[in-house]
Image (cartoon, rainbow, N blue to C red):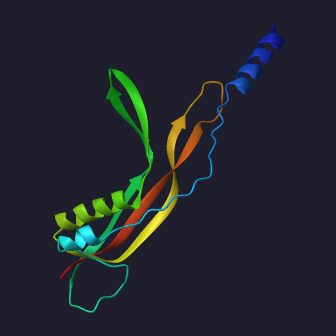
Amino acid sequence: MRKLLFLLFISLLLFSCKIVKFYPETYSNALDFKSYTEKGFFITTSPSVNFDYEPIGMVSSSARSGYNKELKENKSKRVYFRANPSDALNELHREAIKRGANGVIDLKIYYETADVKNIWIFPLPFPIVEKGRQITVKGMLIKR
């Protein structure tokens, strides 16, 4: 009886595994600063500028890929959203305006891998983790 239960447990353990596959993909994303400059907001990746400014502080904004639940026809539908630099830059712009800044200098963009989902399947002794992308935008807030 013990051997049978042990065999059943081992077979459940082996057959209940989920394999997460990541497929190679390429894409490009261009950041357009024109919409910000039309609003009078200055953005540059340079750490120095040739005009006088008042430093306000440092800012950091992030956007992370992940799943979102949307209710559609009384069913729960999971939609995967991919983070992009525009989302993080929009959040940085909102934060800058909130703090009274009208520009960002020394803008840096960081791409990193982040955990998106943590699934625990009963017989497994470890959770299954899917990886996603996190984009962080950092810079120094200024007032011209």
Asked whether 2 or 123 is in front, the reply is 123
Residue 79 x/y as whole percent: 42, 37
- For residue 72, above or below residue 40: above
Q: Eyeballing the image, is 114 above or below 51?
A: above
Residue at the far top: name it: 1
Left or right: residue 115 versus residue 55 is right
Note whether 129 is above or below 125 in the view shown.
below
Indicate left or right for 130 with 143 as reference: right
Q: Residue 95's spot in the image, x, y percent?
A: 24, 63
Number of on-image labels: 0
Q: Residue at x 23, y 74 (%)?
A: 37
Quadrant (top left, top right, bottom left, bottom right) of the N terminus: top right
Q: Is 11 in front, or is 88?
A: 88
In the image, residue 28 lies at what x, y percent?
A: 48, 62
Q: Residue at x 34, y 57 (%)?
A: 87
> Residue at (41%, 62%) from the top-left corner?
136
Which x, y percent locates residue 109?
Answer: 43, 68
